């Protein structure tokens, strides 16, 4: 009877979506703490190993920047981000940022632009929209595309006077006019 109770008690059920979301949020918050304890690093690593995407991103950041007592390892970080990218655009966003910054390699604006586009194909992201708009406005990683930059800046705006809003104003000052749809978004 005791053996049956032990075996039955060890049966694990997959976490509910709410539990998985809470775990992922914890990992992302823990990864931002400056004096991250070994217990929290273990929590992030365990949840990452159990497939939590946000925890994989958090563990990737810890490796990328050498935090939480982990040695900096850009290859491990890239591998974790790539494993997320196959399922969620957030992985592509981190890979794009790494390519743009030249983390572990020479900066590659062409690759960054491509990866930001992949990130946006998988999910909405103000960060990817803004970064792609900036690359398009500056003509880095491809031809300058003010029309595309304007569209992405508008998609990235969250409030008046944020960085994306300033990008909209810069591009408009260069003579770009808004389409009817863009005018509606601009006015909102």
Image (cartoon, grey):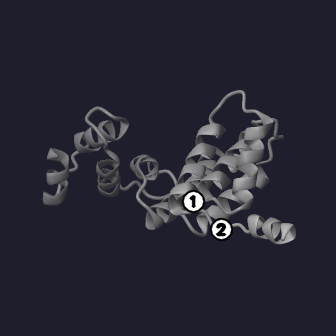
> In the rendering, which numbered label is found on residue 58?
none
The x and y percentages for residue 16 are: 55, 63
CA separation in Å, label 1 and label 2: 30 Å
Residue sitting at x 40%, y 58%: 124
Nearer-the-camera pick, 102 or 74: 74
Q: Secondary structure at mark 2?
A: loop
Structural crowding at the residue carrying mark 1, measured as other residues with C-alpha within 10 Å and reported as few (<14), some (14–19) or many (≥20)? many
Nearer-the-camera pick, 50 or 74: 50
Q: Kindly indicate the quadrant of the structure image that contains residue 166.
A: top left
* Circle nearer the N terminus (1, 2): 2
Left or right relative to 28: residue 69: right
Mark 2 lies on residue: 13
Q: Secondary structure at mark 1?
A: helix
- Measured along the vertical axis of the image, is residue 34 above or below residue 11? above
Residue sitting at x 19%, y 55%: 182
- Measured along the vertical axis of the image, is residue 6 above or below residue 164? below
Mark 1 lies on residue: 92
Left or right relative to 129: residue 13: right
User: Farthest residue toward the right?
Assistant: 3
């Amino acid at each position: 009877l005791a053996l049956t109770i032990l075996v039955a008690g060890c049966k694990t059920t997959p976490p509910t979506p709410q539990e998985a979301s809470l775990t992922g949020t914890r990992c992302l918050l823990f990864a931002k703490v400056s004096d991250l304890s070994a217990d929290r690093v273990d929590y992030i690593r365990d949840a990452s190993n159990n497939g939590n995407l946000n925890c994989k991103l958090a563990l990737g950041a810890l490796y990328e920047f050498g935090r939480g007592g982990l040695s900096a390892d850009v290859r491990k970080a890239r591998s974790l981000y790539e494993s997320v990218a196959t399922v969620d655009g957030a992985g592509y966003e981190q890979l794009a940022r790494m390519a743009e910054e030249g983390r572990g390699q020479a900066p590659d604006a062409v690759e960054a632009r491509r990866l930001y586009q992949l990130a946006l194909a998988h999910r909405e992201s103000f960060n990817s929209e803004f970064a792609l708009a900036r690359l398009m406005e500056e003509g880095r990683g491809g031809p300058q595309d003010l029309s595309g930059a304007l569209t992405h800046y508008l998609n990235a705006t969250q409030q008046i006077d944020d960085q994306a809003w300033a990008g909209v104003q810069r591009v408009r000052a260069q003579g770009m006019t808004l389409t009817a749809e863009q005018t509606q978004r601009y006015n909102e």
